[in-house]
Image: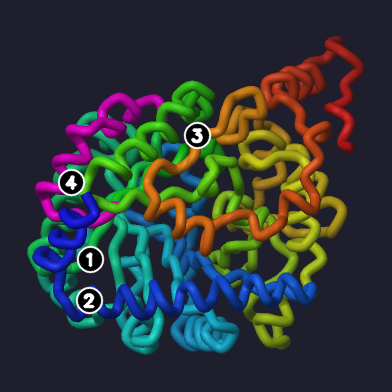
């Protein structure tokens, strides 16, 4: 399998792009993680990987979207981006995720990419704006990989993304990238409406046949003004997704990315471990893209590393999340995020200014952490070694996690429902520990 994957990469991707990937993301990415470990050992902090939402605008209206896509367009301008990326590079970072909205709607996207040939960028996109000309420019840059979102069949894609003809437009953009030998991935936010169609060997085989080099199964988070909680996976489906990824990693010549488990199959949250935090289009620094609460900004007069290192809010978030679950605090304990914002006077960082109300209205759901179920460790030696070196909990849970603090989200959801219903219970939420 590894030989077939290596052959595919050499035959189907521009060799210069592979070198950029291996050096900027591979070698330098490992260095950035090591520097992160060294900082943690000294009691300092700066995340080795930043998610940056460079624009809020989008041409689609997806279910469960947390971005203010209908609001007046807001972008992070080139000077601010250059300052942020340059300072992060000084800290050892080399790998950045660019989100939106739709990043290709940012008119100066290529100016940003081209200003940092010594960094590597993963652009999360619906693919609709990737013409053949755009794909050729991506190939010329060499330091960028588009991650194209596919959310189901033509009918399901239209439902999930709020517009007709979504899938065909997405596949055209994807094919333009592949025709130009750009290193390209496909991601899916797994939910009830696409689980059976896209978590299959047939779909993975189709991606391989097309020339897609990696795939990433996210898990749907019910957040935003129209959260669509009916789409959330069941605990059994979450385990099936984990097992599928572990099995396919040993079988298919395509790279599988995941953000929820370490090499031993223990659940983790990359924001709780400090691996990554998020910057929104207004420059606010948030724990992760779906937690829209902030107390700091990249526009602070202090150097970026000082802003991260001195943030009591972000430090408390990491500690609070790691104390209560190894899973997703957004799914399991929205009440803790609300309490966190209140403790630090953190602001609602959305344009709609309803993030706190959304947290108050949210019910708890199971996430990837399930203390009653056996862990599903990596079978692939390559993934196991890579995760042992570069992607684990960095001591966050061994330092903070207290299993007795974990509350079954189903019980938490019941208690929150009681608290919202007059005449039921005593109106109190579950006691925070």
User: Disc 1 to disc 2, how far (Cα)?
Assistant: 7 Å
Viewer-proximal residue among 44 and 247: 247
Which residue in the protein does label 4 denote?
207
Residue 5 visible? The answer is yes
- Say which of marks 2 and 3 sits in front: 3
Front label number (1 vs 3): 3
Residue 318 sits above or below residue 201 on the image: below
Residue for point 34% across, 36% down = 247
CA–CA distance in space, label 3 to label 4? 25 Å
Q: Quadrant of residue 121?
A: bottom left
Q: Is label 2 in a helix, a strand or a loop?
A: helix
Q: Which residues are magenta?
A: 191-214
Q: Earlier in the sequence, mark 2 or mark 3?
A: 2
N-term-proximal mark, 1 vs 4: 1
Residue, disc 2 = 17
Residue to which mark 1 is pinned: 183
Q: Residue furthest top?
A: 423
x, y percentage for residue 143? Answer: 30, 78
Residue appearing at x 87%, y 13% in the figure: 425
Q: Earlier in the sequence, mark 1 or mark 2?
A: 2
Is 193 contained in the magenta span?
yes
């Amino acid at each position: 399998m590894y030989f077939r994957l290596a052959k595919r990469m050499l035959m189907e991707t521009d060799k210069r792009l592979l070198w950029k990937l291996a050096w900027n993301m591979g070698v330098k990415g490992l260095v950035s993680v090591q520097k992160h470990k060294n900082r943690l050992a000294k009691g300092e902090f700066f995340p080795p990987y930043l998610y940056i939402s460079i624009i809020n605008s989008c041409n689609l209206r997806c279910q469960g979207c947390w971005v203010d896509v209908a609001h007046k367009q807001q972008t992070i301008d080139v000077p601010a981006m250059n300052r942020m990326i340059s300072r992060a590079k000084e800290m050892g970072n080399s790998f950045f995720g660019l989100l939106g909205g739709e990043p290709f709607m940012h008119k100066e996207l290529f100016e940003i990419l081209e200003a940092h040939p010594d960094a590597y960028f993963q652009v999360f996109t619906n693919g609709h704006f990737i013409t053949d000309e755009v794909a050729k420019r991506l190939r010329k840059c060499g330091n960028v990989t588009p991650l194209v979102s596919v959310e189901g069949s033509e009918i399901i894609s239209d439902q999930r993304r709020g517009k007709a003809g979504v899938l065909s437009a997405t596949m055209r953009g994807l094919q333009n990238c592949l025709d130009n030998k750009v290193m390209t991935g496909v991601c899916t936010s797994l939910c009830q409406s696409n689980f059976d169609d896209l978590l299959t060997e047939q779909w993975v085989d189709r991606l391989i046949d097309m020339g897609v080099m990696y795939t990433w199964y996210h898990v749907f988070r019910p957040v935003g003004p129209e959260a669509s909680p009916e789409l959330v996976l069941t605990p059994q489906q979450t385990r099936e997704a984990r097992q599928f990824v572990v099995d396919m990693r040993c079988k298919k010549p395509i790279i599988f990315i995941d953000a929820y488990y370490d090499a031993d199959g223990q659940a983790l949250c990359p924001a709780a471990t400090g691996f990554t935090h998020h910057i929104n289009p207004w420059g606010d620094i948030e724990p992760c893209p779906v937690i829209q609460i902030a107390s700091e900004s990249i526009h602070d007069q202090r150097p970026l590393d000082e802003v991260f290192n001195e943030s009591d809010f972000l430090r408390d978030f990491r500690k609070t999340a790691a104390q209560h679950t190894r899973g997703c605090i957004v799914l399991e304990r929205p009440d803790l995020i609300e309490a966190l914002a209140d403790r630090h006077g953190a602001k609602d960082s959305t344009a709609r200014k309803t993030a706190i109300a959304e947290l108050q209205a949210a019910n708890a759901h199971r996430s990837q952490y399930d203390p009653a179920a056996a862990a599903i460790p990596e079978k692939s030696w390559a993934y196991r070694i890579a995760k042992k070196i570069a992607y684990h909990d960095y001591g966050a849970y061994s330092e903070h996690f207290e299993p007795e603090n974990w509350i079954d989200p189903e019980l938490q959801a019941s208690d929150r429902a009681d608290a919202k219903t007059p005449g039921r219970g005593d109106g109190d939420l579950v006691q925070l520990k």
